[in-house]
Amino acid sequence: MRVISPLILAILPWISGLEGYQKYTKPLEVMKPNQNGVYEYNMVVAKKLTMAYKNDNPAKHATPVDYDYKTQTWSKRDPNQLNPCFANSSFNYISDPADENRMLDVLVADGLHKRVITINGDMPGEPIVVPYMSEVWIRVTNAILMDSMTIHVHGIDKHGMWYMDGVAFVQQCPIQSTNRFEYRFIADNKGTHWYHGHMQTDRGDGIAGGFIVVGNDTSVPTLDDRKRIVPSREYFILLQDWATKVGEEAWMQLEDKTMKWMYGYDDFTKCWEPTRTSDGGNVGGAVPISAILLNNKGWYDHEIVKTQPFNLPLERFKIKANEDILFRIVNGGVAQELMLYVDGHSMTVVSADGDEVVPMQVDRLIVFPGERYDILIKGLATPTKKSYRIQVETIQRYFFDWTEIPIVYGFGFIEYEQDGLPEDKTAPNLMHPECTADKKCSVLNCPFQKWTAQPNFTCISYDNLQNPFPEKIEQEILQATEFNGGFEEHFINMHHDSQMDQFLFQFPWGIPYYHQDDMSSISTACKDTECANNTASDLDTTCRCFYNLEHKLNNIVQITLYNMGLGGGMGTGYAHPFHLHGHHFYVMKVGWPTYNETGFIDQMNQDIDCPGPNVSCNGKKWRKKEWLGGALEGMNTKNPTKRDTITLPVGGYITIRFRAVNPGWWFAHCHLELHLMGGTGYAYKVGDHNEIYMPPDNFPKDCGTFKVDKLPELRLPTTGSTVIPSIFVVFVVVLFGNLF
């Protein structure tokens, strides 16, 4: 049965409640609207203990559970405070209905007992699936003790409703602990998207989930350009590089330069080092990984993961012989680019960031944080075993001292619904034996051009993906000659791990829309910093400011993000996944560095007028001046893909274009969590103030800063407002001060 097809099963009831452990992942289902046709979702954000249940009425104990991979059995601990801590009893969720109910409240995560942030008791939150152009209403209740938060629906442009985009202090006030906020918007972009927390570390601590927008036509393209098919099932996968420590501690250790003790200050057996990829680029914001999660399942013991993944409670997806299924994949992690492949099955990429691409068959797929890809998998006609692994791995290769780092793996399985098939329980060969010198494996979306460390891999850059509907792209976007008007060109050096043009973005203390005439009261202007005159060194905290751009409404905007100069070379630079809120853009050109025979970055791309890796290259433009004004050579003027998140290579650049049609205050940033917190981002305004749609009259707007020039006067809420003179206030203060 086709689950998501509007022809067969148009709208299914939205089931809320506990959605913890289930052996098999549920296929995606479209929500049921309310009586007014609105797709409403109640989102309660709260902390919860993993590997435990609390739905055992009437006791309501938080009862820890444990899993033994050797026997593949679960046990539960005795919650009685007077009994030993590890007094375990049997726990069989398959044969005991009571235990089956308890298991629905269990989150596996990395298999350890930790406090995580959940959405309606689940982590990640259950995918929200709505029709295209439907009205969505998300009611958020912040039940996290003491922490503020916001929710950003990543990939939905929210035309005109910039104040519903979820960036704290740029677009809204934070949702304070115990408070509520309601997001209402139109699902104006089809495809695979996701929602996540957008305030500090909340995304990496569990506030994330899928957001899928489906049209009336649910077919997808195939390698046969004359044929489209409707997958019989669709599954959502959120990939996460689940850290050993909570995000707040990772940030604090980055701030006070104690990251080498990320395994613990009192563990003298391990010392943490940052990591690098095989081209010498650094892995941005990398922290020790406890597990790679597929949705809410992974495992902390890396040796067991590599040798006996079939014995672990990992994510499983059902499939039938010859069945077409679609995987909607999101990297919701904090730092690591992750490579995925499906054992024994070919993968066809059919969509990127929610927009269709000309189908491309690949053997491996790399997904950076914030990026989304849809892949079509066809079931084997004659499967030879019950389960085939979905293998996910890091592509980091070195520690900072250039010693090799072990690869971290995560697994899921596609399991055939067919009796009699044997379960293969041999240790998997993780070294990609099917990739040989004679039959190399294609890898889409490498952060470098050539994978020298993996000579049997062939890298395919994301700009090789093609737009299947070039006739729908407006001709001015594809123009390769100099514009006469209605065009803006911007160059931004996105270097180091926290900077845009040497500025470290600092969030304002109030919403800019309400402070157009007094921005100095809520922010520090970049022109007022020492960095504005290049008098401060890189990473100087005096470079912190409210970095922002302004785009004229309806202009064609061309932005060239480059990664050069200080912090942009081999051993110093980072590949940044760049995400633009409020608009989707076309990928016009990618400029790569050159590499030496060992695969390391040799020289930065020469198209940008940057003298070299040891000087500041902020404010640079094209070396060939005739390329300015839109006349850039080498652009894809035929069929560029449409994206909202794209990766900037170390020592290179990307050029993107979009028409600024969505008025409001928006945000753009690196999607690595610690990089964003460090300052790798900027706000941008589209349109003049009088061209920006106003938030509702009751929109919360007084947040971030409060100051008074003198002692407040005591006033009573009576007609005419009785004002008590300040001299009386002083008298009262002195009097009561003397009394006490």
Image: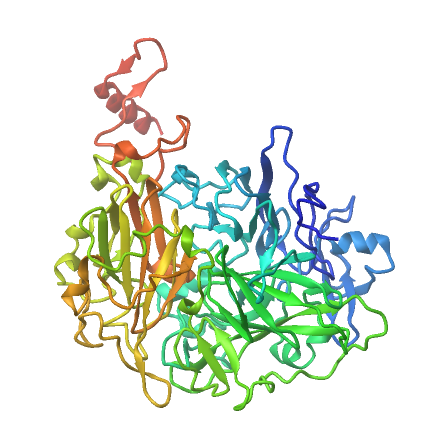
* Residue most extreme to the right: 95
Q: Quadrant of residue 693?
A: top left
Residue 506 drawn at (x, y percent): 29, 52
680 or 734: nearer the eye? 680
Q: Is residue 546 visible?
A: no
Q: Is residue 198 above or below residue 725?
A: below
The residue lying toward the viewer, choosing from 429 and 398, is 429
**Chosen colour scheme:** rainbow
Q: Is residue 709 visible?
A: yes
For this view, does 459 lie left or right of residue 87?
left
- Residue 478 vs residue 112, the one in the foreground: 478
> Looking at the image, which residue sits at the far front?
226
Residue shown at the point (20%, 53%) measured from the top left: 483
Q: Position of residue 477 (x, y in %)?
A: 32, 53
Q: Quadrant of the C terminus?
A: top left
Rendered residue at 51%/65% (across/down): 245
Residue 70 in the image, given as x and y percentages of width and height: 76, 77
How many numbered discs, if any? 0
Q: Is residue 691 above or below residue 68?
A: above
277 versus 679 height, above or below: below
Residue extending furthest toward the top: 719
Give the x, y percent position of residue 703.
Answer: 36, 37
Say which residue appears at 14% left-offset and 65% top-offset.
625
Residue drawn where x is 16% and y is 51% of the image: 527
Q: Would you identify the image quadrant in which residue 586 lies?
A: bottom left
- Left or right of residue 487: residue 199: right
Q: Is residue 734 left or right of residue 302?
A: left
